[in-house]
Amino acid sequence: MKVTEIETFAVDGNWRELVFVKITTDEGITGVGECTLETRRHAVEAAIQDMQRYVLGQDPFQIEKIWNTMYRDGYWGTGPIAMTAISAIDQALWDIVGKKLKTPVYQLLGGKMREKLKVYANGWYFGLTTVEQHVEKVGQLVEKGFRAFKWDPFRISGREISREDFDYAIECVAKIREKVGPSVELLIEGHGRFNTRNAVRISRALEPYDPFFFEEPLPPDNFDALKRVADQVNIPLAAGERIYSYYHYRDFLSKQAVHIIQPDLSHCGGITALKKIAAMAETWYVGVCPHNASSPVHTVATAHVDLNMVNFVMQEIFPLDHEKCPWIKDIVDHPPVPKDGYIQLSNRPGLGIELNEDVIKKHPPKDRPVYSLYSKDSFLLTGVGETHDSSEQF
C-alpha cells in the first residue's frame, strides 16, 4: 500500500479556522487528521503541501520513518507551523493503519487503560462580563453533567494585573466554588500572560478555593521562571500546550515545575509524539491533560492516546462550540458525545471517524481579525467571533 494523495479542508470554526488533512492510498483506504492553528490556516496548508514530498509514494505503515523524515529533512521542523503539519499527517497515517488492520488505533498503541475518559469544559465563559453571568453559565453546565470546568477570569490583564481585575478574578472563582460545591473541579486559565510576581500573588489568592490547577501563569518561554513560581505556591500548576517537540518536553519535565502537562496532539507531533511525551512524563510522576481547542477530529485522535495513557488525568473539550457553530459536530460522522462528564470511543477501526465533506463545503472559513487577550475587543470579553467595541462594558 502506498500514499497517493494528500488533501486539506478548511472550515469556519467561528473564533478560529478549522483545518483537516485527508490522506488517500492506492488501495482506496483514507485517513484523517487535524491541523487547526487558529488564524494561521494558509501557513499550515502551505506546510502540508511542502510535506507531501516526504509522504507521497510511501508505505503508510512506516509511521516512525515518515515522521522522522519530515522532522529531520524539513530542517525548520520544531516550530508551530511545521509541527502542526507533521501532527496532522501522523494522525492520518495511524488512521489508515488501523483501518487496514481493522482495529482501533488505541489497540495499536497497546490497548485501553480505561473504558471512558473524564472531560473538562472549556470555552463556556466567552462573552461573559459579570461574575453573575459566570455563575449562571457554570450552573447550566453542571446540569448537563459536567464535573470539571476551565476558564480565564482575568479579563484584559497582561504582565501586570490591576487591582480591579485581580479582585474580579478572585471573586469569580470564589462565587463559582460556592455555586458548584467542593466535589467539582475548577481549572483556572492564565493564558501565559503574567510575570513571576503576579503569578505567585494570584496563586496564593486562589489557594482557598482549591483549584485543580492554575494553567500557564507565565509565558511559555522560560521554564526556570515557572519553576520559581512553583517553589513559592501551594496549588498545582499546569502548562505545555505551546511546547512543540518532545525534545523540548524533556527539558521542561526536568525542571519539575508543573504537576500537569498539556501537550496538544495537533501541534506536538501527533499520536506518535503524544505517546512519547506522556511516557516521559510518567517517569516524573506527572499527569497529562492534553490540550484541545479544536474540532471532534482532534478530540477523537487525542482520545485514542488517552485511553492507552498510564498517567492520563482529564481531556479538554469545547462543548458550547456546537451551540454557536452547530455544523462542527457534523464535520465527522461519529463525533464523541459527552455524557455525565465523560466521553467514550467505539471499537470502529482506525480513528473511527470520517470527514463529512458536504458539511465542510457548506461552511468555508471566514476572514477574521486576530484577537488579543489584552484588548477590550478581545473575543474573551465581547463574545466569540464578534468585533464590536466593548469599552462601554468597563
Image (spheres, rainbow, N blue to C red):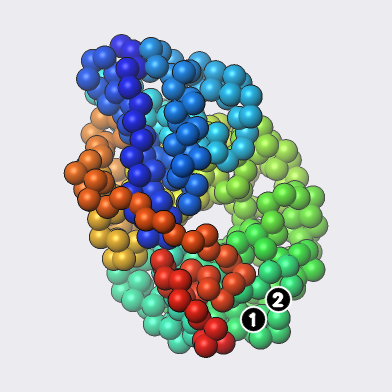
Local secondary structure at mark 1:
helix
Q: Nearer the viewer, residue 390 or 200?
A: 390
In the image, is 82 to the left or to the right of 149? right
Q: Is residue 4 above or below residue 250?
A: above
User: What whole-number distance in Å separates the C-alpha atoms at marks 1 and 2?
Assistant: 6 Å
Amino acid type, mark 1: Asp
Q: Position of residue 127 (x, y in %)?
A: 44, 75
- Whether 20 is drawn above or below 117: the answer is above
**Res 195 quadrant in image:** bottom right
Q: Which type of secondary structure does the marked residue at label 2 adopt?
A: loop
Taking depth in this image into account, of 84 and 154 the one nearest to the observer is 84
Q: Quadrant of residue 102?
A: top left
* Along the viewing direction, whichever of 186 and 240 lies nearer the viewer: 240
Mark 2: amino acid? Ile
Task: Tell whether label 2 touches label 1 (CB within 8 Å).
Answer: yes
Q: Residue at x 57, y 87 (%)?
A: 394
Which residue lies under the disc numbered 2? 161
Question: Looking at the rendering, which quadrant does residue 230 occupy?
Answer: bottom right
Residue pictured at 66% horizontal, 86% vertical: 164
Residue pictured at 67% horizontal, 63% vertical:
193
Vertical comparison of 120 with 336: above or below: below
Q: Residue 319: horizontal and vertical position, in percent?
A: 35, 61
Circle 1 residue? 165
